[in-house]
């Protein structure tokens, strides 16, 4: 049933919102007509919207943009464990869904991985966050979400902010003005996830109705963990319908969620194939555990008056939100409609993440003997040198396990080489990053529709305003020495006498450095105003679109200054480190900038037959970056769309993408407190396919994929051209990416069984293309059973063949990475997981 719904979706007359930012308004609209090809048993599954068009009731086959749709049933079939999982449903989006439920990376059409730029996540037509990045901290799909709509390129850069590459719009379930309805769902997975979802809506009067929904959950995360992370999200809506078809809607939402976070971990490489390090399983291993709870890190007293800041792995990522929103639409004549949307979001997160291999990179992954032997081979040689000075009678150094108290001296090589079955120690950075912010947004305007004979025109114009402020505290980023195993232990470095008696402690409860990533205090404010207009007209079978948006951003950046002389640690602090490292001195460097830019696009579609069309599009957009330079994107695309009744529907698109002046910072691998700057152009040529075959009513095969050739051009690091990088593939970007989903409907509407194969092509860990991470394919299976009209049971299993797949190397190792002695840091997918849900509708 699910894929027949999809075919109906593709072929139906897709009733559009007034504009991309107004997609939410169409929740109250109805779809009264469908193309003949869509008249099957699934064609009328609720109203259908195309994000990125401004003409009401425009068929998808006539669209001049690259559009993807997924209704509630397709979302349930995907069985997403995170927002990133949902983004995998959009061809051309590469998702690195390996960080856990949140803080994942996604990129579009050849842009290097590791970020979230040019892709705007929206809820009901408004950005979750103005800047785009970090939106998955504060949004997760649940039963209140009806469908996903996506547009890549095209009008995306005109009809939203900071989304020139793609807009992914999550549309809420419409408030029910006709009758009460509701649903509850209970979900569980073998790794320990327990979740309960609920939704309820009913009319209050003939014009007023409400809905409420959300979820609660508890989960240790997909990798082995020593504790659970729990939380909740809740959303409520009250809607009044006007007699003329307009509406006014008041809604609110809030949440308090904890989630696990995973960064890189060591892998063993043999002939280019990744595998496990002994005691640390590739598929479910996790160095995090009890040893990383409640660690007091010395810090500048200007950042924290006590002189310490606590890192607590047990908290993971704590995301808190509350939002109030008001939407309205009011026709003032048969052809003119006014609209308005506004929301205020208050949000924060407290991020406690472990980053093994940061700064020291692969050099920090070495034997315990090397760690304790003074000289260039020791990743803590500076600490050993300071220890020798502090304790002149030192004969040798050793490690002390902070959990067991066991002491092993550097002369006990047999014990050190047997440590955890792999002999390794590593340096792990404790990244405590907190954000406290607000995001205010408005979008108001109107549309005018005109029709005469075979000429139709829809003109939309409006104003967007966003004001946002983010205060960030990333002070007290420090590193510890720990072993290489799941639930690893942290070690103190100790000075020993001839009999291995402790004469002094060099580290501070395992901490071997403070202030690793700079002073860490900063704020950003944006005050953005956009004016936009989008026109779509058709003459017979020819459809032409064009739009333009002008944005001005008054941006301010406050960066905490580092003291010329680092502040001393508080009295009584253990170890030989005398300062807190990079020290905020209580002052800021303030930068202000008024940035202006224009995005524009033009596209055309010609309907050759009722079931076959061709289209082309050019778009030129940009990404605002606060006070930093605006980055640009230029997109060319052309494609065909076709449908043959129930047997086939699909599209094929060729594209060229030029990313201009891509600029970002990365930590210098030699001195992590120093930020290096990379600037480059990226050019990508590719082909995108979205196809559905249905040889018989009960069986379907869906294929989505992108085949592209992304290249780096004019790359410079810290202003110096890197000719050796010319023509390289951007880091963490695959050339091939596709998904195949066969599905079989059980007889008599009893349900469906399906499989899914996802292929990720080879990627490079670095812009220098020194380390290639191999391609991999993940196989998943699932089934849904309709036990009654009200009761449904769904089961699914992911990565059933336990494939090893890596989505990134070590981003903090630099742009020229290498595998050292067969070992390398990377972040990978997890092994086989399975579970299911029970849903009761009423």
Image (cartoon, helix red, strand yellow):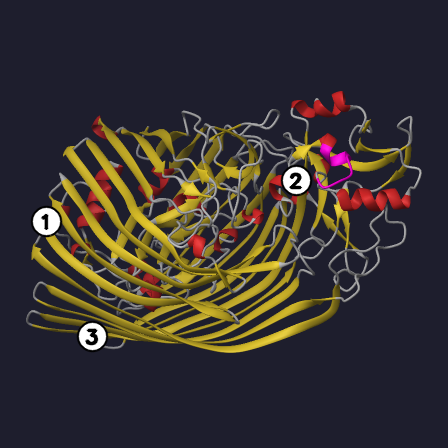
Residue position marked by numbered label 3 in the rendering: 335
Please give the name of the residue rendered at 73% of the width and 36% of the height, measured from the top-left corner. Answer: 371
The CA span between labels 3 and 2 is 67 Å
Report the front residue among 747 and 524. 524
Residue position marked by numbered label 2 in the rendering: 364
Which SS class for mark 3?
loop
Residue position marked by numbered label 1 in the rendering: 36
698, above or below 213, in the image = above
Please give the name of the residue rendered at 57% of the width and 45% of the height, measured from the top-left corner. Answer: 231
Q: Nearer the viewer, mark 3 or mark 1?
A: 1
Tell me which label, 3 or 2, sits earlier in the chain: 3
Does the stretch in magenta take in 373?
yes
The CA span between labels 1 and 2 is 64 Å
Which quarter of the figure is the C terminus placed in? Answer: top left
Which SS class for mark 1?
helix
Tell me which label, 3 or 1, sits earlier in the chain: 1
Q: Which residues are magenta?
A: 370-376
Residue 527 image offset from top left, x and y in percent: 50, 75
569 with respect to 234 (left or right): right
Which quarter of the figure is the N terminus placed in? Answer: top left
From where the camera sits, is residue 247 visible? no
Tell me which label, 1 or 2, sits earlier in the chain: 1
The crowd level at tag 3 (other Cα within 10 Å; few <14, some 14-19, many 20+) is: few
Does the stretch in magenta take in 11?
no
């Amino acid at each position: 049933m699910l894929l027949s719904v999809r075919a109906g979706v593709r072929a139906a007359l897709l009733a559009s919102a007034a504009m991309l930012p107004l997609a939410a308004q169409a929740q109250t609209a109805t779809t009264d007509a469908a193309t003949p090809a869509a008249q099957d048993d699934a064609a009328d599954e609720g109203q259908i919207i195309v994000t990125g068009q401004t003409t009401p009731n425009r068929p998808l086959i006539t669209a001049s943009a690259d559009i993807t749709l997924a209704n509630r049933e397709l979302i349930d079939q995907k069985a997403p464990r995170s927002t990133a999982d949902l983004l995998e449903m959009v061809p051309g989006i590469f998702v690195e869904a390996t960080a856990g439920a949140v803080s994942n990376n996604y990129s579009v059409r050849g842009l290097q991985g590791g970020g979230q730029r040019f892709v705007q996540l929206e809820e009901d037509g408004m950005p979750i966050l103005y800047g785009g990045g970090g939106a998955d901290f504060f949004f997760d799909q649940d039963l209140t979400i009806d469908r996903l709509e996506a547009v890549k390129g095209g009008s995306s850069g005109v009809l939203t902010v900071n989304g020139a590459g793609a807009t992914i719009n999550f549309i809420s379930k419409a408030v029910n003005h006709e009758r009460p309805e509701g649903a509850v769902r209970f979900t569980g997975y073998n790794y320990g996830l327990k979740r309960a979802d609920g939704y309820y809506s009913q009319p209050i009067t003939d014009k007023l109705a409400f809905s409420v929904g959300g979820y609660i959950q508890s989960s240790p995360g997909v990798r082995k963990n020593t504790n659970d992370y729990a939380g909740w999200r809740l959303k409520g809506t009250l809607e009044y319908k006007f007699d003329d078809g307009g509406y006014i809607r008041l809604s609110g939402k809030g949440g308090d969620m904890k989630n696990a976070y995973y960064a890189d971990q060591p892998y063993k490489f043999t002939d280019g194939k990744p595998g496990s390090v002994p005691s640390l399983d590739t598929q479910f291993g996790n160095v995090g555990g009890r040893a990383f709870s409640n660690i007091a890190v010395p810090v500048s007293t200007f950042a924290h008056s006590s002189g310490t800041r606590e890192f607590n792995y047990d908290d993971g990522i704590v995301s808190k939100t509350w939002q109030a929103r008001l939407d309205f639409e009011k026709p003032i004549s048969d052809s003119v409609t006014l609209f308005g949307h506004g929301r205020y979001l208050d949000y924060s997160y407290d991020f406690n993440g472990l980053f093994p291999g940061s700064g020291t990179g692969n050099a920090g992954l070495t034997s315990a003997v090397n760690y304790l032997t003074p000289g260039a081979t020791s990743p803590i040689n500076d600490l050993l040198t300071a220890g020798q000075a502090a304790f002149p009678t030192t004969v040798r150094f050793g490690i002390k396990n902070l959990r067991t108290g066991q002491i092993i001296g550097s002369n006990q090589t047999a014990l050190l080489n047997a440590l955890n079955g792999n002999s390794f120690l590593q340096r792990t950075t404790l990244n405590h990053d907190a954000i406290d912010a607000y995001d205010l947004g408005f979008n108001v305007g109107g549309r005018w529709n005109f029709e005469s004979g075979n000429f139709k025109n829809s003109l939309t114009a409006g104003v967007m305003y966003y004001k946002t402020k983010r205060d960030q505290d990333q002070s007290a980023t420090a590193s510890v020495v720990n072993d290489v195993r799941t639930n690893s232990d942290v070690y103190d470095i100790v000075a020993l006498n001839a009999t291995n008696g402790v004469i002094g402690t060099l580290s501070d409860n395992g901490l071997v450095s403070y202030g690793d990533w700079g002073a860490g205090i900063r704020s950003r404010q944006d005050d953005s105003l956009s004016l936009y207009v989008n026109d779509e007209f058709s003459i017979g079978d020819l459809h032409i679109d064009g739009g333009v948006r002008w944005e001005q951003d008054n941006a301010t950046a406050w960066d905490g200054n580092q003291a010329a002389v680092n502040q001393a640690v508080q009295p009584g602090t253990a170890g030989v480190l005398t300062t807190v490292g990079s020290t905020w001195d209580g002052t800021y460097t303030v930068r202000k900038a008024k940035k202006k830019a224009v995005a524009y696009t033009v596209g055309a579609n010609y309907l050759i037959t009722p079931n076959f069309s061709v289209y082309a599009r050019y778009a030129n957009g940009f990404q605002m970056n606060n006070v930093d330079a605006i980055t640009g994107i230029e997109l060319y695309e052309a494609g065909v769309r076709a449908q043959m009744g129930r047997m086939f529907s699909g599209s094929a698109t060729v594209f060229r993408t030029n990313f201009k002046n891509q600029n970002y910072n990365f930590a210098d691998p030699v001195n992590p407190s120093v930020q290096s700057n990379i600037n480059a152009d990226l050019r990508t040529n590719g082909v995108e396919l979205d196809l559905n075959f249905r040889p018989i009513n009960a069986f379907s095969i869906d294929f989505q994929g992108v085949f592209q050739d992304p290249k780096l051009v004019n790359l410079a690091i810290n202003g110096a051209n890197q000719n050796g990088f010319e023509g390289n593939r951007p880091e963490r970007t695959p050339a091939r990416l596709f998904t195949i989903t066969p599905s079989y409907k059980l007889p008599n509407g009893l349900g469906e069984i399906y499989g899914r194969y996802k292929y990720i092509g080879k990627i490079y860990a670095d812009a220098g293309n020194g380390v290639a991470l191999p391609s991999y394919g993940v196989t998943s299976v699932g089934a849904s059973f309709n036990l009654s009209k009200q009761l449904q049971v769904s089961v699914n299993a992911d990565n059933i063949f336990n494939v090893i797949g890596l989505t990134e190397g070590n981003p903090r190792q630099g742009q020229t990475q290498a595998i050292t002695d067969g070992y390398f840091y990377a972040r990978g997918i997890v092994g086989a997981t399975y579970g299911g849900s029970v849903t009761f509708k009423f």
